[in-house]
Amino acid sequence: MAISDAWRDQTASGYALLERAGGLAPGLALAVSIAALASAAPLGPILLAILLGLALRNAIGLPPAYQAGVQLAAGPILRVGVALLGIQLSLRTLAGLGLAGVPVVVSCIAAALLLAACMTRAFGLPRRLGLLVAVGTAICGNAAIAAVAPVIGADEDETSYAVGTITLFGLIALCIHPFVARALFDGDARLAGLFLGTAIHDTAQVAGAGLLYAEHYGAPVALETATLTKLVRNLFMVAVIPLIALLHRGVGPRARATSGWPLRRLLPAFVWGFLALALVRTLGDRAVEGSGGSLDSATWTAAVRLASAASTACLAVAMAAIGLSTRLDRLRRLGLAPLGAGLATALTVGIVSAALVRLLAWRMLGAP
């Protein structure tokens, strides 16, 4: 009798598991298909994934059977993608950039966050949307938005609008800033790269702008400097995400007294994962370069590339799901104010970056 009951329990559990998988499969397969299609885009899959998801949702609609899988992609898969971003960020990149880039990066991040806070009030934006625009402009575009959105409880509409705003102005900067940098810094590719790495939002956009400068002016050092600067800028997610969590949740003495101040409330699990993988990358790089070769370089490089590709894939699937979750008729209530705030913030970051590169990095990099 006991064996029969145990068999029934196992059968019921297996049935429930299959039923759950069947409920997730349609939406998840749709998000993965959109992300795969978007991955063929030359400027990266993030923007195209969300645009395709938006177009499908608002032109055709999304049947209820797809909801569970889309929610899985926009939630847990998004968090896994953000955590995997940590493998791209070695703490040793700070030393590689040198003294010149750090104050420029810090000042640009501070300027973006402060101005975005002012613009949020001036344009009457919802607080969560303002925060997303701020971190997207200040740190690393869509990746920062994806990282911060779960921390502050942003909904799909706010995340989608923030991604669209940041991507729009980042793409404009990608096309314009290489030529602005050439004119501003008299053809010095190092200074141009430092400007591109601090003035453009998303990592893929920075790489595109650096490549455009390198190909147009025959200066590959601009691409190298821009990419390195952007990686250093991305590292500040480690500091800014806890800060955003503190500011958004209003943590203070009363909160500590009532909640016990658990670290898991300040930093979600995926942020701890991000930090852990950044540490793994740092230690792995050191092991490869250390005496005795305790870690094979080719194996380590392949592992890093695999984790980076997995992160990009997860984020693309998540962005497709966010697009599939967003109804444009609900975005109308947000109006054009976020675009105005995004434009003002992007322009200010560009101006601050150009001024600081001229004032600080000019001497630190030994430019003539």
Image (spheres, helix red, strand yellow):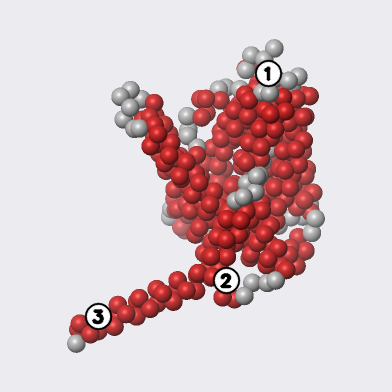
Quarter where residue 364 is shown: top right
SS for tag 1? Answer: helix
Task: Measure the C-alpha gap from mark 2 to mark 1.
Answer: 53 Å
Neighbourhood count class around disc 2 (C-alpha, 10 Å): few under 14, some 14–19, many 20 upward: some
Neighbourhood count class around disc 1 (C-alpha, 10 Å): few under 14, some 14–19, many 20 upward: some
Mark 1 / mark 3, whichever is N-terminal: 3
SS for tag 3? Answer: helix
Task: Measure the C-alpha gap from mark 3 to mark 2.
Answer: 33 Å
Task: Say which residue label 1 marks.
Answer: 362
The answer to whether residue 183 is seen in the rendering is yes
Task: Say which residue label 3 marks.
Answer: 6
Q: Is residue 33 above or below residue 350?
A: below
Residue drawn at x 46%, y 45% as measured from the top left: 307
**Do the residues bearing badges 3 and 2 touch, measured as CB atoms within 8 Å?**
no
Residue 345 in the image: x percent, y percent? 74, 42
Task: Say which residue label 2 marks.
Answer: 67
